[in-house]
Image: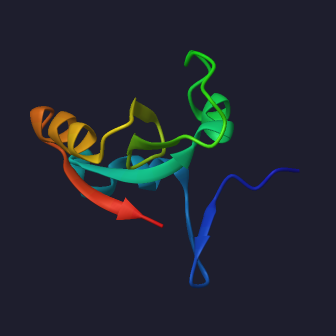
Amino acid sequence: MTNNNITSRGSKISPEALALLGGGKIAYLKMVRSEDVQKQFPQAPELAPGTLLYALHAADGTPILLTDSREAAIANAWSQELETVSVH
């Protein structure tokens, strides 16, 4: 049996609750290594190993954008009226 809830500090948050977080107006920005891109962005072309990229995701984890520039990711979020938060 798979548990699809995300746990944070002892609390469980369902994927549905994450989708509603921020009223659909929050996206998170995360630095991603090129070796991990295919898991999140299967349509992405093959990338040189060791490249650092920026991934923009909806609050529920849905991938929105992959870019080599933090500024481009933030600009894209702003153009979609999304507030960005960083994830480490």
Residue extending farthest bottom: 9
Residue in front for this viewpoint, 74 or 63: 74
Question: Which residue is located at x 66 percent, y 36 percent?
Answer: 49
Q: Residue at x 46, y 36 (%)?
A: 62
Write the residue at 21% across / 44% down: 71
Q: Position of residue 11 (x, y in %)?
A: 56, 78
Horizontal and vertical percent position of residue 59? 38, 50
Q: Is residue 56 left or right of residue 48?
A: left
Please name whichever residue, 51 or 79, is drawn nearer the observer in this view of the structure: 51
Q: Residue at x 65, y 28 (%)?
A: 38
Quadrant for residue 18, please give it: bottom left
Give the image location of residue 45, x and y in percent: 57, 15
The correct choice, above or below, for 30 with respect to 42 in the image is below
In this image, 25 relative to 65: left or right?
left
Q: Nearer the viewer, residue 43 or 47?
A: 47
Q: Is residue 18 left or right of residue 44?
A: left
